[in-house]
Image: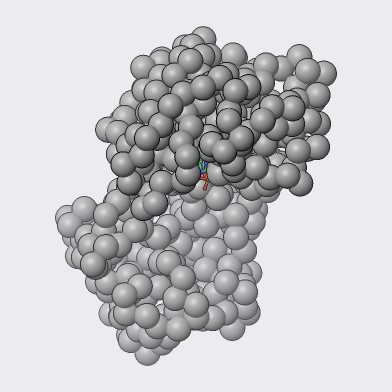
Amino acid sequence: MGLNKKSVDDINVKGQKVLVRCDFNVPLKDGKITDENRLVAALPTIKKLISDGGKVILCSHLGKPKGEPKPELSLAPVAARLSELLGQEVKFAADPEVVGPNAKAAVEAMKDGDVILLENTRYRAEETKNGEAFSKELASLADVFVNDAFGTAHRAHCSNVGVTAYVKTSVVGYLMQKEIDFLGNAVENPVRPFVAILGGAKVADKLNVISNLLEKCDTLIIGGGMAYTFLKAKGYEVGTSLVDDEKIDYCKEMMDKAEKLGKTMLLPVDTTIAASFPNPIDAQIEVSVVGSDAIPADMMGLDIGTKTAELYADAVKSAKTVVWNGPMGVFENPILAKGTIAVAKSLAETDATTIIGGGDSAAAVNQLGFGDKMSHISTGGGASLEFLEGKELPGVAAANDK
Ligand code: AMP
């Protein structure tokens, strides 16, 4: 299932002004970028547009400045690091209005093959409301629009959706194409067996993902905080573990659905427990492992147990396609990261197509040094989840059809 949208390969940008929406929403600490994967992932599209002789105007949001200039959320450090990664100057168009006099002057001065970066689009309050005025201002800078920001594709904002109404040509970039190809193929046309692994905190956040993946996969593996709502739905005592009481019926429904569809649903057979949630999160903590049906009433489940980790790793071994979203436990604490590490390792060791759905699982895989062992690590947590739910992403829908 290829993406039926025009891409940067379908246009000729020689001498044209090209506005490129990237996802440069990177973590910053004291003005330094602590994870530059999203910058690296944006390079192929930028390089292609430079070599075709376009005037490349990059834009992105960063964090949540809530509609006003916040110096600590300026994209200036991104321009500096991008210049190094590209080996070519990325001029930063500092401008509190994003598309104000400074930005316009910078665009006017561009020569073919030049690159500039606009200021954080969320300095403008209209951005997240998909407002008309700011959409038009952005469009006024460019002849062509390229959307390569997969991480924002599940939102309809000025800089990825509104702007497309006011430019003649809107296409997707290579990163967007790659993300949709990997995730789309896994879900719609997987080489089987297809194993989906879901973890993270809450069932409520992943209702539609659970339901949709159950229909598409052969085996659905559940870990993390959300597993305890399933265990409670099975009638087990789960102690003080994280539970969505309102979703117990939903979990029962999903277990019935799995049975009716003949799908395997794996739940933890044992669990790592402690007296309370670690505080601070990486505090030394005393843990033990018990069967999932033997959690004491005053204890809390914080990771899958050792037998479960083996069970899940075995399921991965027999798979040809694996999609993973969400940690198996409170992986921020090394004592409670064992389940997440075991799953990450099993994905690193298989020849199957392995797709990491962004967010915490992507961070975990990269931190563990398994990044280059995966077939694809999505740059978008929220966007990949909505894609796995089977939803259309507005940022993709807005691009011109082939
Ligand atoms: P999510 O954002 O839904 O992917 O959830 C990620 C968060 O879930 C991480 O911060 C984990 O610490 C947390 N988490 C994973 N397992 C548990 C658990 N058993 N109890 C509480 N929180 C958990």
Q: Is residue 312 above or below residue 204?
A: above
Q: Residue at x 60, y 54 (%)?
A: 154
Q: Nearer the viewer, residue 247 or 399?
A: 247
Classify residue 267 as left or right of residue 56. Answer: right
Q: Residue at x 71, y 17 (%)?
A: 263
Measured as percent of width and height from the top left, residue 348 is found at: 36, 22
Q: Is residue 240 above or below residue 318?
A: below
Classify residue 153 as left or right of residue 392. Answer: left
Residue 395 visible from this viewpoint? yes
Q: In the picture, residue 254 is in which quadrant? A: top right
Measured as percent of width and height from the top left, residue 70 is found at: 37, 80
Measured as percent of width and height from the top left, residue 336 is found at: 40, 35
Q: Is residue 28 above or below residue 300?
A: below
Q: Nearer the viewer, residue 251 or 174?
A: 251
Image color mode? one colour
Q: Nearer the viewer, residue 230 or 366?
A: 230
Q: Residue at x 60, y 23 (%)?
A: 294
Residue 48 visible from this viewpoint? no
Q: Nearer the viewer, residue 167 or 123?
A: 123
Q: Residue at x 45, y 62 (%)?
A: 21
Q: If the image is split into quadrants, where does the N terminus sit?
A: top right
